[in-house]
Image (spheres, rainbow, N blue to C red):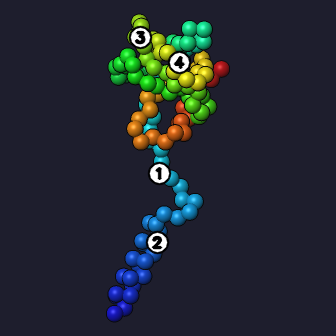
Amino acid sequence: MKNRAAIFIGLFFLLGACANKPGAKPPAAMRVDWAGTIRLVNTAENFVLVESESPTAVIAGEKYLSVHDGRETGALRITDLRAHPFLIADIVSGNPSTGDKIYIPRPGWTQQSPAPADSSPQK
């Protein structure tokens, strides 16, 4: 009888610890594969020049998001593949800037854009 009570109490605390509680932290964010960095913005003709950092092939027509300081700055669509590692992308929306990082949004990601790790050399 004591064993059953001990098991019951143990399960009670174990299951209680697994329950969703108000203020509980959400699961860790998925890793983002940065595709490149915007090197030039031409607002007059509505395109950007991207230096690719991705080892995978880029496909014309793919949609990318640009991010600066953890905030989404624009949406881009790859239109032309130039001399490696440079890509041309039309600005679909927003105001991307030189130095913004870009990535391909994946299904299931939240609307909040990830913050890129600072990979630039210190000056």
Answer yes or no: is residue 61 visible: yes
**Considering only vertical position in the picture, is 6 above or below 11?**
below
Secondary-structure class at tag 3: strand
Of marks 3 and 2, the one in the foreground: 3
Of mark 3 and mark 4, the one earlier in the sequence is: 3
Q: Residues within 10 Å of mark 1 (few under 14, many from 20)?
A: few
Earlier sequence position, callout 1 versus callout 4: 1
Q: CA distance from mark 2 to mark 1?
A: 18 Å
Q: Nearer the viewer, residue 100 or 45?
A: 45
Q: Amino acid at mark 2?
A: Gly
Q: Earlier in the sequence, mark 3 or mark 1?
A: 1
Q: Residue furthest right?
A: 123
Residue pointed to by mark 2: 16
Q: Looking at the picture, tell me which residue is in the foreground, 43 or 4.
A: 43
Residue labelled with disc 4: 91
The label number, if any, that marks residue 80 in the structure image: 3
42 displayed left or right of 107: right
Mark pair 1, 4: CA separation: 32 Å
Tell me where residue 116 appears, x and y as whole percent.
54, 32
Left or right of 3 in this view: 78? right
Give the position of the N terminus as an image quadrant. bottom left
Q: Which residue is mark 1?
A: 27
Q: Residue at x 43, y 77 (%)?
A: 12
